[in-house]
Image (cartoon, rainbow, N blue to C red):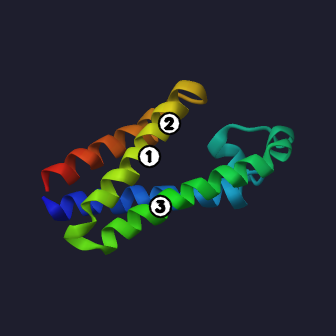
Amino acid sequence: MSLIANTVVGLIALLHVYILVLEMFLWDKPAGLRAFGQTQEAATASKVLAANQGLYNGFLAAGLFWGLSLGASGMGVKVFFLGCVLVAGLYGAATANRKILFIQAIPAAIGLVLVFLS
């Protein structure tokens, strides 16, 4: 079970690295425009805010990788950062886009359950 839990945590961390790249570097490029359904004008106007948001996603990824690097003693770190991802996903789904629930919040909830079971 521990291997499955750590694999899910790792995949969630990689997802947040991908979101970091989209928000910090590709926000106003074709890939970012498609991913977030933005117009060029809206993306240009919000580029600095998106980069800041991307940085926070990077912190989430770093925390999850840190928890993984600690092995069995990293459970608390993984739980904390998965909880942060879950809360961010719930807030994003409620305020920005419902699909964030499926992309971010539900995987974090599954990760939390698996970490607790491992």
What residue is pinned by disc 3?
A: 61
- What residue is drawn where x is 79% and y is 38%? 39
**Residue 104 got which mark?**
none
Few, some or many residues within 10 Å of mark 1 (<14, 14–19, 20+)? many
Residue 22, percent from left and from top: 64, 55
Q: Work out how far the residue at label 2 is from the one at label 3, CA to CA, in angstroms.
A: 16 Å
* Res 111 visible: yes
What residue is pinned by disc 2?
A: 100
Classify 73 as above or below 57.
Answer: below
What residue is pinned by disc 1?
A: 85
- What residue is drawn where x is 35% and y is 63%? 10
**Which of pointers 1 and 2 lies earlier in the amino acid sequence?**
1
70 vs 15, left or right, is left
State the residue in front, 52 or 21: 52
Classify 89 as above or below 73.
Answer: above
State the residue in front, 14 or 54: 54
16 vs 118, left or right, is right
- Look at label 3 and name its amino acid: Ala
Q: Dot 2 lies on which element?
A: helix
Query: Which residue sits furthest top?
Result: 94
